[in-house]
Amino acid sequence: MKIQPFSVLLLFLSVSACGPLKELEQVLDPDLTPPRLLRVRSIGETDVELCFDEQALAEPGDFTVRPELAVPAVACEPERLVLETACQRPGERYILDAVVHDGRGNSLSFLAVFYGYNPEPPRLLINELSCRGTGNHPDVVELKVLSAGDMAAVTVYQGTPSEWRDRLVFPSFRVKAGEFILIHFKPEGGEEEIDETGDMTVSGGLDASETAYDFWIPEGTGISGNNGVVSVYARPGSEKILDGLLYSNRTSESDERYDGFGTLPVLLWARELVAHGGWVTAGEAVCPEDAVNPEGSTGTRTVCRDSCSTDTDSLNDWHIVPTLGATFGEDNSDEVYLP
């Protein structure tokens, strides 16, 4: 006699009626996929957060950290784990070797990087930008320090935390209000291009300054000349934005794609910058007209704030200085370039 599919289901139900309903759910809708890791970041001097797309389970013995960092406890919460660690060194680059699993035994092994929590990041502003550099004056971004603090793990992006073209994670060093930091986005690769954490005079290279800390993007190829975002965050993966700059020479009508920005990455960067409170828009949605227009700028006609470093998180803060008006490592000029 041919058994109908419905009879098979009834037979299964009668046999397993005493078993947990969860077993039936697993047979009818099996989950064979382990948790997917979304993010790892330090959230305190002794806490590291791991976010997943589903509930993940683990014990302290499932984690190893290099350089050595003890993990005495793990809190399992919906879609995240919080590791209790020994006290982290601010800005230290740690590698996490871990195994987690879900409620059905699907396991995930992974390596991830996080940086030691910095409890005292300084207040910083993007103060001056060269995005159309030349051979003798390559692309540079200047940060102005507004309050004393530790630069450990402070992160500068060409882009935003979700997606970037270049990223610099600072080591631990103290800064004071009124000091300047230069990030050179197109180094030549010479030995004289030294990252400075103390003496401001030790670095050479094009446009190195003796009145600012110089840092060099490894293998950097420069900043987009027409359309982009530069942003500064308290640490990698953080949503705590310290400052941002949106610039574009486009308009909403100049390109039908991506709301006028022309490329998907720039549109996504602009949206994330606004979402994190780093830029103010005139309307509900960000558009190229909200951005600073870099037209007319060069390697020495830089895009600057005023001499007081006015900050309203909008295009109104910015102007282009005349030829040879760049002031990297010094207070900005209020002179305005007139074509």
Image (cartoon, rainbow, N blue to C red):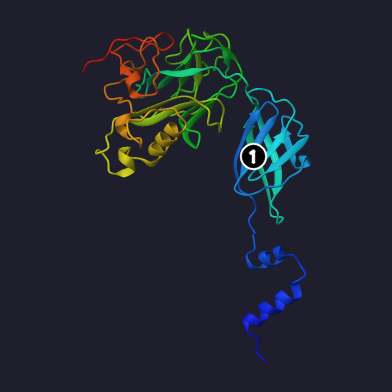
Query: What x and y, as percent, mark residue 36?
Result: 61, 48
Question: Where, by quadrant of the figure, is residue 119 drawn?
Answer: top right
- Check the image and report above or below for 199 versus 102: above
Where residue 24 sits, quadrant-wise, is bottom right
Give the camera-side residue of 67 and 36.
36
Specify the amino acid type for callout 1: Leu
* Residue under the point 58% across and 24% down: 153
Q: Position of residue 56 (x, y in %)?
A: 68, 47
Q: Which residue is labeled 1 in the image?
A: 50
> Up-down: is 170 above or below 175?
below
Height in image: 329 above or below 264? above
Number of numbered callouts drawn: 1
Residue 327 shown left or right of residue 7 in the figure: left
Name which residue lies at 47% across and 20% down: 183
Task: Kindly indicate the quadrant of the structure image that contains residue 23.
Answer: bottom right
Percent x, y for residue 79? 63, 45
Left/right placement of residue 228 relative to residue 38 reads: left
* Residue that appears at 63% across and 35% down: 113
Q: Secondary structure at mark 1?
A: strand
Q: Which residue reaches farthest bottom?
A: 1
Compared with residue 85, is residue 141 higher up or lower down, i.e. above or below? Answer: above
How crowded pointer 1 is (Cα within 10 Å; few <14, some 14-19, many 20+) is rated as some
Residue 260 percent location from the top left of the image = 30, 39
Q: Is residue 253 left or right of residue 141?
A: left
Name the quadrant of the C terminus.
top left
**Residue positioned 64% across, 39% down in the render:** 50
Question: The N terminus is located in which quarter?
Answer: bottom right
> Viewed as shown, does residue 289 lie left or right of 90?
left
